[in-house]
Image: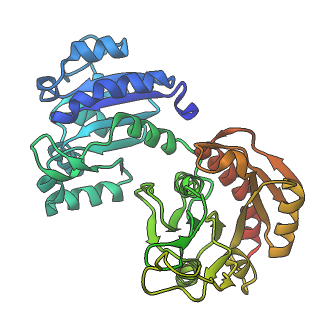
Amino acid sequence: MAELGGKRILLGITGGIAAYKSAELVRELQRVGADVQVVMTESACKFVTPTTLQALSGKPVYVSIWDNRLPNGMPHIELSRDRDLVVVAPATADFIAKLVHGAADDLLSTLCLARECPLLLAPAMNRQMWENPSTQRNVAQLHGDGIATLGPDAGDQACGEVGMGRMLEPMDLVREMSAWFQPKLLSGAHVLVTAGPTFEPIDPVRGLTNRSSGKMGYAVARAALEAGARVTLITGPTAIEPPQAARVERVETARQMLDAVNACINGVDIFIAVAAVADYYVTNASTHKIKKEGALPALKLALNPDIVEAVANRPNPPFCVGFAAESEKLEENAQAKRRRKNLPLLAANLVQTAIGADDNELILFDDEGSHRLGHSSKLEQARLLMRHVAKLYKPRRSALPV
């Protein structure tokens, strides 16, 4: 979360039960080095006290527009002037409606109107309130006005119901804020990512697959979104939750993945093939479960299509990035694979340290040679990959005919 180090954030808290999470949010933001100033509505004070937030933030908490602790008596102006970002968490349905219509009847709403820095909202409300057409219209209008929303999430709610409307958890909000500060190097680009393993049936309960967790591919999809791209994620079977803003297509086999890629490749600017595609499929798969009794089954195998090679060798292909997991001779094998598949960029790692782990150590190979990214989390590796992709892709994009 280095992107938040030294950032000056104004945290607005409105009157919803999720306000209790804001105390933890303050602590998490401070833990990553952010400077936090809290502003609360009168209703928020019914759920958590200003004394609590002041103790956690180390700064006075402001509630009233008539607060005279600032020398010029204009807290709605002064409080946001030195801030890099205003975040309202939780943002109730009422507060969202106020922002849409430009209402300003308290310190926080007036401050949001008078701000000069960006504004992010973390909606939190009962599921019926979130699904109400008026709320959805208001959120759509906010997006049109350039105000982004973080969440909400689905799950158990304080009212005892289950559904969409939960405020994101504090650590999720910190991650989303960190993502917001990422440079938008791929703004306007459409990125297609494949992720996860594929599964090739032997019978209804067995199959050929691999040990891929999907973590790297999902991190790449997230990093592409952070870089401002529109992202389509085609994923094999995995238990990971995909990024909310990505369009997701779920497949099982390699041939299904190829069909899904071909169905949406037109108009794609960048194709990143992270999926660990099974090399073979079973041509004589059984429609019924194979019993253990009797002779061992004789499986007949055929080669699966090479998806990234097929895309890279299309007429006018998108900018293609391949992935290679090697167990030995990493550089030699990766360079040979890149040349054979006609790829401008290939990312490679050793399987012994990467499969299933939360961190990775990629080496990027392109026409200029190799580039080591060092050891870090898979999300940080993906962010570094996006920066390298942007450097190679931009000259290519500018060279295209208008």
Judge left or right: residue 124 versus residue 331: left
**Color encoding of the figure:** rainbow
Q: Residue at x 44, y 67 (%)?
A: 247
Residue 78 visible from this viewpoint: no
Q: Residue at x 12, y 29 (%)?
A: 43
Locate residue 282: give its quadrant: bottom right
**Does 337 sit above or below residue 6?**
below
Image spot of residue 317 (x, y percent): 70, 79
Judge left or right: residue 104 versus residue 76: left
Q: Residue at x 29, y 40 (%)?
A: 113
Q: Quadrant of the N terminus?
A: top right
Image spot of residue 382 (x, y percent): 63, 50
Residue 384 visible from this viewpoint: yes
Image spot of residue 278 (x, y percent): 64, 72
**Does 164 sit above or below residue 256?**
above
Locate residue 55: give its quadrant: top left
**Does 158 sit above or below residue 135?**
above
Q: Quadrant of the C terminus?
A: bottom right
Judge left or right: residue 38 versus residue 190: left
Q: Report the front residue among 251 and 224.
A: 251
Q: Residue at x 18, y 43 (%)?
A: 103
